[in-house]
Each structure stands twice: as C-alpha cells, then as structure tokens.
C-alpha cells in the first residue's frame, strides 16, 4: 500500500501513562482506561484505507494485544516534536507515499476523519487536525511535506501549538489543509466532555468502562 497510518503510542504501563488523568482518578483506573482507548482505536484503525504501523515508546519488543501482526517501530528523539518527525521519516523510508499520524488521546475519532486526511493529501503537502485545546490531534504529509522545522522548538502542550505549526508550514512554502476540530482526553474535565459527547452513541470499550465505574464528576 502507498499509504501508512501511524499510531503514535505509549506502551501501557501502570503509573506511566495518562499521568494528568491518573492524578485525578488513580493509576489503576487510568491504566484500564488507556487499554480501552487502544481497543477502540484498533477498531477505528481497521476502517482506515492504509497500512497500520505503531510507533511507540516503551520497552524493547513490546506487544500491543489489540494490534496483532502490526509492524512496530520504536520512537526516537528527545521531545515529542522530534519523535513525531523521526516517526514520519522512518516510515517514509519504507517507501510510503502518504502518511497520517495520530496519538492515543482521541479514542472516539471517526475513521472518516483519517480517510479524509489521506484524501486531502492528494492536493496538499500537509494536513492538520486541530484540537479544541490549541494543539493538533493528527498530522499527515507527503515526503516533500516533511520538514523538521514544523516540529522544532514548538511550545508543546500549550494553546499555541496548532497556530505555530500552521505558521511553520506556510513559512516552508508548503500547502496545507485543515480538518474539523476534535477534542482529546488529557484530564478528568476532558473525560467528562467525552462522556457527554458519546452517551447517546453506540457502545464503545471506553463508554462501557465509564458506565461501569464511578470515576466521573457530575455535570
């Protein structure tokens, strides 16, 4: 296939994932929720018309039970920007023509958004999915659209990430397209919004877990 869908993940280890959320709901609940995130993302990813590749941080030879027979590469780099850049670079080195990368914090993102990102890359160099918090939940590009300047020296985890990234893309003379906004899950407030957004939708692993556990605040 000419398209690759990178899932940019952390290996699930208690106390080492979803740390902002775990400080509010405890390590065990955050760990169990993260496993549910991965299960729902695995269902969505199979609806994307691209080869799935996991690029992860964690122990050597880590296994992701929800992604059997999926190629896995280790993340490399000193910050999230470098790690994303090298993830894209390493997968392009395998001969793919279009790549979309997303993380694990958006377990309810529709597959249509990812497929739309690939479609947009027919006409532009880079595609971004803006988050409601000022960051971005997805980035995709073609080989000529991969520039280290897009990822270098960004104030990550701030409200300026998306705007600054879009500015860098424009400064590099690249053509960009933007998807609709989507909200990720970093803390308990985000988790409550996720629940409200999905309470009338079909059951997912995350929603099933939340409906069984009393970890959410009231409205």
Image (cartoon, rainbow, N blue to C red):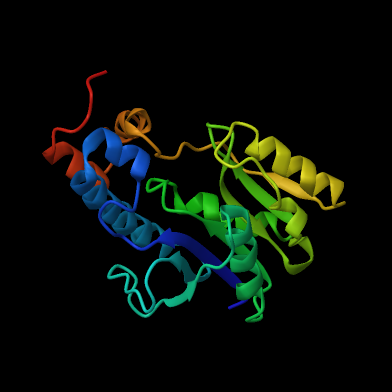
Q: Is residue 219 above or below residue 117?
A: above
Residue 120 falls left or right of residue 36: right
Q: Position of residue 210 (x, y in %)?
A: 20, 39
Task: Say how many tags the image has.
Answer: 0
The quadrant holding residue 79 is bottom right
The quadrant holding residue 124 is bottom right
Q: Quadrant of the N terminus?
A: bottom right
For the point 73% across and 62% down, which residue is it?
146
Q: Would residue 205 be seen by someone viewing this image from the given angle? A: no
Q: Position of residue 40 (x, y in %)?
A: 32, 54
Q: Nearer the viewer, residue 94 or 164?
A: 164
For the point 42% across and 46% down, which residue is it?
106
Q: Would residue 193 be seen by someone viewing this image from the given angle? A: yes
Q: Nearer the viewer, residue 135 or 149?
A: 149
Point out the residue furthest to the front here: 78
Point out the residue furthest to the top here: 219
Q: Is residue 116 above or below residue 72?
A: above
Q: Position of residue 3 (x, y in %)?
A: 60, 71
Q: Position of residue 11 (x, y in %)?
A: 36, 63
Residue 165 falls left or right of residue 94: right
Residue 60 falls left or right of residue 30: right
Q: Nearer the viewer, residue 123 or 72?
A: 72
For the point 37% across and 56% down, which residue is it?
41
Q: Quadrant of the C terminus?
A: top left
For the point 62% across and 81% down, which residue is it?
94
């Amino acid at each position: 296939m000419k398209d690759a869908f990178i899932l940019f993940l952390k290996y699930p280890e208690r106390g080492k994932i979803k740390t902002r959320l775990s400080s509010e709901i405890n390590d065990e609940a955050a760990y169990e929720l993260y496993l549910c995130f991965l299960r729902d993302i695995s269902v969505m990813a199979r609806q994307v018309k691209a080869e799935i590749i996991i690029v992860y941080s964690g122990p050597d030879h880590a296994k992701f039970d929800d992604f059997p027979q999926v190629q896995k590469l280790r993340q490399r780099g000193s910050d999230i920007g470098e790690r994303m850049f090298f993830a894209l670079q390493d997968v392009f080195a395998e001969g793919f023509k279009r790549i979309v990368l997303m993380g694990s914090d958006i377990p309810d993102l529709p597959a249509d958004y990812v497929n739309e990102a690939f479609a947009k890359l027919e006409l532009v160099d880079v595609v971004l999915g803006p988050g409601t918090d000022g960051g971005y939940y997805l980035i995709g590009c073609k080989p000529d659209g991969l520039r280290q300047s897009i990822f270098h020296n960004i104030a990550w985890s701030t409200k300026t990430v998306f705007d600054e990234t879009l500015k860098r893309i424009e400064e590099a003379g690249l053509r960009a397209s933007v998807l609709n906004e989507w909200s990720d899950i970093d803390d308990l407030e985000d988790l409550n919004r996720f629940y409200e957004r999905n309470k009338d939708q079909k059951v997912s692993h995350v929603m099933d877990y939340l409906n069984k556990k009393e970890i959410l605040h009231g409205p």
